[in-house]
Each structure stands twice: as C-alpha cells, then as structure tokens.
Image (spheres, rainbow, N blue to C red):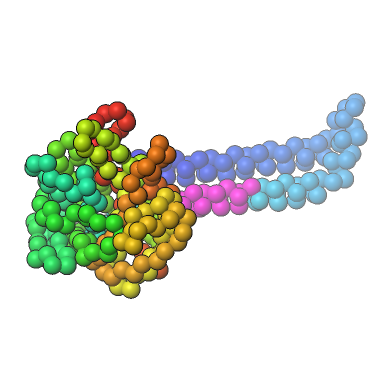
Amino acid sequence: MTKAFDTFIKNKYALLNYSLFIFVTRATLRVLTIGEFRLPGQFHFFSDYAMKNSFLLIASLLVFSLLCVSAASFAQQHSAGAGVQYSQHKHDLFSITSSDYWVAFPSNYNGENDGGKFIKIYISSADSTTAFIAGNGLVPVSLPVVPGATTVFNVPLSWEMETSDSVENKALHVWSDDASLFVDFESQDAYTSDASNLIPSAGWGQHYLVASYESLNEQEGVYNYDEPSEFVIVANQDSTSVTIIPANALRSNAGVHPAGMPFTISMNAGQSVQYQVVKVTSDSVFDATGTSILSSKPVGVIGASSCANIPVLFPYC
C-alpha cells in the first residue's frame, strides 16, 4: 500500500511538471505568433504591445515555469522524506522502546481476597525469546516466549499494593535482552476484575496528570465499603525525586495530604508507592483524577480505583 502510494505521488508530480512545460510552450508560441502576425480589428493594439514586449513576456513565462517546477520538486521531495521519517519512527518505537517494562499492582478491592484472587502478567512477542522477571526480594525468573502464544506469570499476592503514602519495594522488572515484548497484567477477585496494558519504561515521562475513577463508599447493614480512588508511581532509577500536587486530599502516614498542597518523596530503582483518596464523607466526588506528578527522572504512573461500580448502581467492580 505504501509503495503504491509513493509511486502515485511520484507520477503525480511528474504529470504536473509535464503540464507546466506544455503550458509555457503554448503561451510562448502564442506570444511569438501575436508578435509576428498582426491581428485584424480590435486586436491591433494588443499585437503592437506584444511585439514590443515579446522578449520580456517570454522571459517572465520561463521564470514562472522554473519556479513552478521547483515548487513541485520540493513538494515531491518533502512528501517522500516525510514518509521515510514516519516509517523509520514507527520501526524505532517497535524495536527499541518495547523490550523493558516495570510494573506495580494497585490495590484491588482494598487487598481483600474473597476466594480465588490472582494477579497475572501476560507476555507475548513476535519473536522467539526469553523474558526475565525480577524484583527486590523475588527470585529472578526466566520464561520462554514464542510467537503466537502468551506466556503467563503468576504474581505472588504479597506484591499487591495495600498502603497509602508508603514507599515499598514492590516494583517488578520485566524485560528481554533480544526482542520486543508486549506486556499486560490482570488482577482478579470475586466480583472484580481489572487489567492494564503496560507502557515500556522508554515511554515514561516526568510530568503526569493522573487519570483515575471516583471513590466508592457503600453502606450495607453493618458493612461500610471504603473503596478509594488511587494511583501508583513506579521508579526504575535511584534518587528519583517526585513532587505530587493532589487534586483531592490523599491518605498519609501522618494524616492527610491536603488538596492543592505539593509534597515531595524520594524513590529508588525497584520501588513503588500508592496514594489513595481520603474516605468519602459527603456526596462530593472523591477522585484522584487531575493529581499532578512531577519527577526528576522518568517514572511510571498507573491510575486506578479500588472498586469502581460502572454504572453506579451495578454492584460489581
């Protein structure tokens, strides 16, 4: 498809150049003809003018022709160049930026296990390779990955984030030494199932606005369900300074991080931290969405909600 389009572009500009040549040639002959043979009646004046200025007109037409041809050639080269750069850019993203991932797992249903809860990492690749998984305190794992199949790794449930405002050694590193990977994870419990496609670490940034979902607070008999809006930050470099400006008040080890009040934490490679919005106390929306994150080095950010009923009256998350 791309080759055919490039051929069309080249042919299009060749046709334009040819058309300009024909136009200039016919115009020049017309000027020479008008100058050599006087036309009868009302055209006598134009004939005299053309005769006196024929060389000027011819020169002007030739200059115009050269300008048009140059413009067409420039447009042709610009179009071809843009296509090459775009294709190369796509190739670079595919082959370079998708072989290294880091991930931490947000709290699902406040860390509760109602039976059969699991967290799984799914790995696939267009090439035969070996995927490695490592983390602080986790025995490194190597897994074969083959095209057309998905490799599954069962994450110990102890790696789920269950705190707010505590930097922990709960980031897992997933990578391949010689191939691009596609990595997803799933966190599932009774009545709740969540999943996310992971962004490679090469695609991380230093300034984020959290995209999350509002907290859920339901009362049923003696039960009071407190399922907060939340987000997780992951670091893969030591001495990473992270400044957070909450959109809503966040739970803190010292009480509360007020909305709009910046605070800064420090993280090292393989560490993660989760923040949860304070417990719902009114009909107002309690949501981490819009929280600003600025870091001294690239970090990964995952927006989440401990339990999101969508729509509100559908009691499963």
For this view, does 283 lie left or right of residue 179?
A: right
Residue at 12% over, 64% down: 138
Image x and y of residue 26, in percent = 68, 38
Residue 177 position by quadrant: bottom left
- Viewer can see residue 34: yes
Looking at the rendering, in which quadrant would you find the C terminus?
top left
Looking at the rendering, in which quadrant would you find the N terminus?
top left
Query: Which residues fall within the magenta stretch?
Result: 68-83
Q: Quick one: 91 or 137, which is closer to the camera? A: 137
Image x and y of residue 183, in percent = 21, 51
Image x and y of residue 185, in percent = 20, 49
- Viewer can see residue 97: no
Q: Is residue 178 magenta?
A: no
Residue at 77% over, 40% down: 31
Q: Quick one: 186 or 24, which is closer to the camera? A: 186
Residue 33 position by quadrant: top right
